[in-house]
Image (cartoon, rainbow, N blue to C red):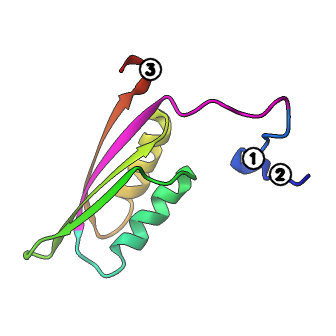
Amino acid sequence: MIADVYAGDDDAREGGRTAQPAGIATFSIVADADANLILRIGAALNLLNVAPRMFTMESGPEGTAAVQALVDCSEPQAELIARKLQQITCVRDVVVKYGDLTNA
């Protein structure tokens, strides 16, 4: 069996991995409404290797876009992705809110 150990694909070892991330992050992003904005944000979120639960984008008449994404991840992962999103040149602001699912 072939496994991608760098992506955490080691389910065949020791009974498999059943743990889910301990929380959920909501990313609120304000950016210039560029044609490739979805691609750039998607590339940063792709580093989590999990599909977002929700992803919305609204473009305003003033040339900005508001993007929201809801993703299952741990708090350190959310902070890492927030920093990656802030490095995108067309992004003006990133706010991340993290909720712990164990205390919900």
Q: Which mark is residue 103?
A: none
- Which residue: 34% across, 58% down? 55
Query: What type is the residue that disc 1 sits on?
Result: Asp
Q: Quadrant location of residue 103?
A: top left
Disc 1 and disc 3 in contact, CB within 8 angstroms: no
Disc 3 and disc 2 in contact, CB within 8 angstroms: no
Residue reaching furthest bottom? 35
- Which residue: 43% across, 52% down? 52
> Who comes first in sequence, dot 1 or dot 3?
1
Q: Secondary structure at mark 2?
A: loop
State the quadrant of the C terminus.
Answer: top left
Q: How many marks?
A: 3
Residue annotated with mark 1: 9
Q: Is residue 42 above or below residue 2?
A: below
- Which residue: 48% across, 65% down? 43
39 lies left or right of 32: right
Q: Secondary structure at mark 1?
A: loop
Q: Position of residue 16 (x, y in %)?
A: 77, 34
> Who comes first in sequence, dot 3 or dot 2?
2
Q: Which residues are magenta?
A: 14-31
Query: What type is the residue that disc 3 sits on?
Result: Thr
Disc 2 and disc 1 in contact, CB within 8 angstroms: yes
Residue annotated with mark 2: 3
Residue annotated with mark 3: 102
Spatial CA distance of label 1 from label 3 is: 24 Å
Q: Position of residue 35 (x, y in %)?
A: 31, 82
Query: What type is the residue that disc 2 sits on?
Result: Ala
Q: Position of residue 86 (x, y in %)?
A: 35, 56
